[in-house]
Structures are given as structure tokens and as C-alpha cells.
Image (cartoon, coloured by chain):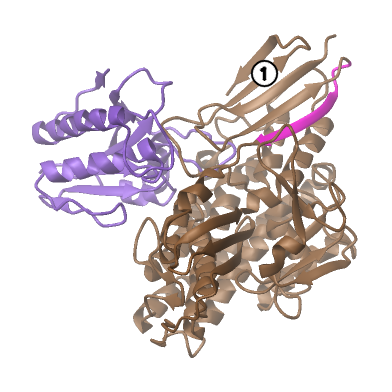
Chain colours: A purple, B brown
Amino acid sequence: MKKKILLLGYGNPNREDDGVAWHVLKGVAAGLGLPVPESPDAPIGKFEDRIELLFVLQLVPEISEIISQFDEVCFIDAHTGEINAGVRATEIGPKFQNSPFTHHLTPQSCLELANSIYHRTPRGFLVSIRGFSFQFEESLSAETDRLSKSAVDLILKWIRSGKFVETVIS
Amino acid sequence: MVAQKITIEPVTRIEGHAKVTIRMTEAGTVDHAYLHINEFRGFEKFCEGRMVFEMPLITPRICGICPVSHHLASAKAGDEVMGCPPPRTASLLRELMHMGQVIQSHGMHFFELAGPDLLLGFDADPAIRNVAGLLAADPALTVKAVNLRKFGQEIIHTLGGRRIHPVFAVPGGVNKSLHADERDSILKDLDESIRTIEAGLAIMKGWAEKNAEDINKFGVFDTGYFGMVTPDNGLELYNGNIRLIDREGKQLECFDPRNYLDYIAEHVESWSYLKFPYYKKLGYPQGVYRVGPLGRLNIAEKIDTPKANAELKIFKSIGNGRPVNQTLYYHYARLIETLFAAEHVAVLLDDPDILSNETLNTKHDFKGHGVGVIEAPRGTLIHDYHCKPNGQVETVNLIVSTGHNNWAMSEAVDSVAKTYIKGPEVKEGMLNRVEAAIRAHDPCLSCSTHAVGEMPLLVEMVDPEGNVIRTITR
């Protein structure tokens, strides 16, 4: 039986590169032959009834319930210059991580919540794309736009081959 | 021993982050602690030139945690700009959505952010002082807490129809009516949600009894209090006048929120990007005030739902006739408000007009200027728009809840640092308390952006020459 996969992008599409995940999901939808949604609010279709694409503004605790229904979850986000890569694809595991001042949740924390509350831990992956500019813009910077296409290729390759390969693209 | 400075900063934030600097004396005691917050005025510029009917869709993107508050405040401002007051049903439905927002936001804060502090203790290892630790300690409660937040989110989703940003309130009303089956679906989970909130209140009260000493020395100081009230000074979260009381509880003002600029001014400090609002007539800092749950319960004389009103009476007894001024009681006040919000959901759903299809006023009498005010979970939120005759927004002024509480948060940090940090050896428990002083206010530092990574704390101890003599990251 084929695995159920969730591609979960998050970020703020009004803050330029912070919303790169939204652009990546659009690219993946096109690559899978799904209708490309017009706005981040619009639902994105399913591929073969087993691969679901979802975009949210921010990770929140109840998303752990959705996560728990899949075999594999790929989080898609922006990263800053602290991570020395243009695109980075890594496997992640459940681990609660502190965000002392805010309601910010990490993918690892979401996996931990799925594990703790719903007793299901899908395999977790994180594909992050370097963001260069976080102004009040709806489009991506040229650099991040270029990298987002590499991220799309990487995700499509994983879906088609069934094998997730940890990757760093400079 | 040299004088030194300790800096606590979430280091991976792109913008809008807070930083705490604790300046030590040569004797090793705290001289003063400051909370610095970046401001996000950029969003106001971003809105200029947009059409006023777009604003309820754009402004929720300021925040991923309380988008509904911005959505509704923006729609209220739009009602004024366009001169199209919403029909009664639309106001009821907006208020219902707002209750959903209060339940999910307050529920998340108490059970998932503050809960670990209260249930596991300030001195607990940070590795377990989180929701996962809470889950291990009380799995049933944690599952209920997640369901409580989900209940609030379901109300928003039922009305807003989208998972990310609600598309619901528009100038003049709302674009969707409520169906009987949707009403029944919300009601189905209401009793369980109320039981969860009551369980939280029992935890809070038990904790307060056991930790009275900590509560009474943790960020205790007098301020004014500010928030919305019903016509007879009851708790109000959606639509009403603003009441301001002084540190003794005496009413200073009760005014139409449209006139907020007649009463509030903003002070600038060199060490913070965020301004410090204060009551004009008293000046700064005498006129500083607190908003949010503690502020609202201090200005309210009653609550119009029975269970929450009974809890309010107990809460009021803490102050012995004066406002409750202990920072940690923000948590207690937050739960009482959550109880009110849940009870109020039942009141709204029982209203005979709630299922009406008359949800939009399409007749306009363009005014060009509008102020929309709402009590967001964290406090009073003000949207103020000036528009051209074609509806294009010319200027935007946003005063967000965290701004009103800026002085109080910094004062709480200073007070807690002075109380708990003794000597150069900074222990985990001390830092936990400094964090908790900020967390009690549930600030929205910036949900507008984020990126991969945790938000660890960086603690730097700096000597008078600026040399870092010690760094702690966790």
C-alpha cells in the first residue's frame, strides 16, 4: 500500500521570502498535474488520493491531529542565513522545542505533539529554502525564487521515486 | 566585582523580537532591567493605497495567532468609513467568531504556554517544562486542552470558511449566514469545553493558594487599567465604550473609542522601538495603564454570564476593593474570560436572530474616516483608517494590544529581575521567572514572519567596557 504523504508549507505570503513555501507548493501542484491554487487561502487538491498539499500561516498545536493521519510529513519553510545552504532537505524527528516568548511552534514540536497526543509519529522531513528579504511584498526575491524551483524539483523527485534523500543545495 | 549587563534575546527572530537587558551593579544586584521590542510600523505603510474593503483580508496577515481580531477590527473600521452599520445578525455572528478566537487563543496560552510554568514549576528543567512535560504529567488534561483550542478554531472555521485567513466580515456586515446544523455542531462540543475551562480554573486557584508568596512578589505594581465595557460596566470584548480606571479603581474616563486620540498619547524611550501609550491627562509615566485580561477584569464590575460572573467575584476579592495588581493573575483573569467567551457562545447561538439571512447592509453613506476597536485576547486593538472618496486607504494607524502593555511588561521584567536575580550566578529558575513575567502578558511580539529554528534565549553578561564576560544560550 502506498504511503500517505502530507506536504505542509507554512509562512507569511505577505512577507516576501517568508512565504516561499506557498510558492513551492504551487510548483509541486503544477508538477503533479493538480490545479494550481490562486491564493494561499484556497484549498489545494490531493494527488492519487494519498498526497495532500496544505498551506498554513503558522504551525499551531491542533495541526498535530492532521499530521498524525499521515505516514510521512514534509514541512516546507524559509530559513535565514544562519543555515548555510540555499535549499536544505533533512529528516527530522519528534522533539519538543521551546519558544519562550511566543506561540511559535517548530515542526519537531508538532511531530512530538502528534506522537504524545495521538500516538502516531509519521516520518518527518523538513525542506527549507533560504530567504534573503522579508519586506512587505507578495513576490519572492530573485534569489529565493530561483531556489524555490530547486526545492520543487527535489520534492517531486522524492514523490516519484518514493525515496527521500537528505540534500543540501548551495 | 565589575558592573555587568545581562542580555536575554531570542536570537533567531527576523523582526519584532524582544530582548531583555539586565544591567547589574558592581555589588552584583540588578540595577535595572529593560524589555526592548521592535515595532512593525511597516504594515501600516503596506496597507496604504489598498481599498478599504480589502483591509479585513489584508490585516489578519499581521498575525498568525490572532488574525480574527485584526479581521474584525478592520471590518468595524470599514463600517465607519463606508457609513454602513451592519445588521444585528451580522454583529452577532462577528461576535461569535470573536468568542471562538478568544477561546482558542486564551486556551492555548494557559494550557500550552503558561501551564508548564504553573504545573511543573518555574524551577523545572526547560527540557520538560513545556507542553510535552505537561502531557507526561497529566495526559488527559493536555488532550482536553488541545480540544478546547480546536473548539474555538472550529467556530472560526465554520463562519470564516477558510483555514488560514477568515473571509467573513466585510464593511457593512458579513458574507455568510449561520445554518441550523452549523449552530448545532458548535453547541455539541460546548459543554465539554466549559468543563475543560473549569478544570483550568481549578488548577489556577490551587496553584495560587500554594504559591501566594511568589505571586505577591512577582511583578506587583500599580497602574491604571483600560478596556471595553458594556453600558453598565460589564465585561465587553466586541463593542462598547472604553473605561479607564486609576490604580485605586476610581474611574478616570469612559469614552467612545472613536475618540481614542483625545485620551491616549505615546511616549518614546531611547531603549525601545515600541512606544509607550499613556493617559494624556496624567502624563507619562503616571498615566501608564494595563490592558488585556487583567486590565479588563479590573475595569469590569460584573460579567453577564453566570459562571464567569461568580468567578469574577472571587477574583475581585483578591484586591480587597482595589484593582488586582499581581502580574501572575493575568493567567487567572485569562481563564475567567475564556469561561465568559464559552458561555457567551451559548447566549449568541440562542439568539432568535442568529440564523437570519439579513447579514449585510448594502446602503452606503461614505464618511471617509473610521475607527474600529475590539478587545483582542491580549488587549485593546485599534484600527484607524482615513480613505479617499473612492475608498482607497490614505493613512492607517494601528495600535496593537502589546503596545498598550509595553510599560507594564518592562516594569514586570525589572521587578522580577530585581526580586529573583541575586549575584552574578544566574540560575535557570531566575531566567524562567524573567521569561514568565513577559509571558504572563501573552505578548504578540511578531507573528508576521518566522523562519526555521527554535527561539532560544541568549544571555550575555557584559562588563562596563562592553566585553562579554559570560554567554548562556538555551
Q: Position of residue A57 (x, y in %)?
A: 39, 48
Residue with the most extreme front position: B389
Question: Residue drawn 60% across and 58% down?
Answer: B377
Quadrant that contains the C terminus of chain B: top right
**Which range is magenta?**
B27-36
Secondary structure at numbered mark 1: strand
Q: Position of residue B85 (x, y in %)?
A: 52, 80
Q: Given the image, what chain letter belongs to the residue carrying mark 1?
A: B
Residue type beneath disc 1: Glu
Could you tell me what secondary structure mostly forms the magenta stretch?
Answer: strand
> Is residue B408 in the magenta section?
no
- Quickly name the residue at label 1: B460
> Is residue B28 in the magenta section?
yes
Residue with the most extreme bottom position: B352
Question: Residue drawn 41% across and 79% down?
Answer: B183
Classify B384 as above or below B403.
below
Q: Considering depth in this image, is B329 or B168 the residue closer to the camera?
A: B168
Q: Position of residue B464 (x, y in %)?
A: 78, 12
Quadrant that contains the N terminus of chain B: top right
Q: Considering depth in this image, is B149 or A26 the residue closer to the camera?
A: A26
Classify B23 as above or below B3.
below
